[in-house]
Each structure stands twice: as C-alpha cells, then as structure tokens.
Image (cartoon, rainbow, N blue to C red):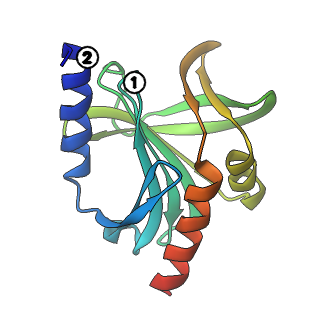
Amino acid sequence: MTLAAAALIAAAGALQAQQLEQWGTAGGWDVMIDPSLGDGCLIQAAYNDGSLVRIGFDRNEGSGYITAFNEAWGDIEEGATYDISFDLDGQQYDGVAKGIYLNDVPGADIYFDNPDFLFDIAEKYTLTLYHDGGEVMAIDLGGTYVGLEAVIACQDEMG
C-alpha cells in the first residue's frame, strides 16, 4: 500500500467518524444520512487526490450542498468565505464556499438553493472547482445520477 493511499484511507475513515448513518450504496457512492443536518441524505466518495466529497441535502437550511475535504488544503480558515467557481463539463457556475474543518481536515462547504444545479451535477461527467483562478480539484462524477436518485429515495424515506 502506498503512503498516499494509506493517507487517503486514514482521512476518509476520520471523516466518516462524523455521526453519519449508512443508508446504502449507489453508482459507486456511499449513501448516508446526516442527523446533524435534520436527517439530510447525501452521497459520499473518496478520490485519489485525497479529496472526500459529499453532495446532499441540509434539511435544517432547506438547501443542497457540496462539501469537499482534503488534507492538502491546510490554508483554509474555519468560517472564512471564499469566492469559487465550478465548471461542470464546460458550464460555469459561481458561488461562495465556507471554510470548515472536520477532525482537523480542512474543507470547503458550498450551499446552493437552485435545484437545477443538483440536476446539472447528476447529468455531468466532471466537476472542476476553482478559487482565485486556480484549479482546486477536479472529480469524476461517474455514477452521480444513480447516487443522487438514491439520495432522493433516502430523503423520501426520512419524510
């Protein structure tokens, strides 16, 4: 096992220690329930670059979110906001990310209230995140449509 793979597994394990409940799997994603977000359902996957990505619903806020964590993002400040842009297979979106930490792993929390954005994510192949003109991460969205269908079924089950 390489050092990078070991670090990825350790980071994913620490992040999963947050009180998430396993609901199932779909499209290569773990489908989880987050009690701290009003039993909001989400999909979660770990990537080779060390990123752990979650896409789901915050029922407390009544919105959707994308959250990503990565040990390499050590300069993120808890609670600070960052102007970001997304590229979904060439379609551009602008937004604001909030710096967060979970088990000492830095991350970015991006909320959205436009349901079309969720469907755009589900139908695309690559999500690239930019900050200050530089690429922060690019992830393969394969299986996301199936994963988000499962999130909707999970959310329906949660009531």
Q: Is residue 62 visible?
A: no
140 with respect to 11 (left or right): right
Quarter containing the N terminus: top left
Residue 90 on image: x %, y %: 80, 27
76 with respect to 150 (left or right): left
155 with respect to 34 (left or right): right
Question: Which residue is identified by label 1?
Answer: 48
In which quarter of the view is residue 6 placed? top left
Total numbered circles: 2
Q: Residue at x 23, y 62 (%)?
A: 19
Is the Cβ of the residue at disc 1 closer than 8 Å to that at disc 2?
yes
Q: Is residue 100 visible?
A: yes
In which quarter of the view is residue 15 placed? top left
Q: Residue at x 18, y 33 (%)?
A: 10
Question: What amino acid is at disc 2?
Answer: Ala
Question: Which residue is identified by label 2?
Answer: 4
Residue 148 on image: x %, y %: 59, 59
Question: What amino acid is at disc 1?
Answer: Asn
The earlier-in-sequence mark between 1 and 2 is 2
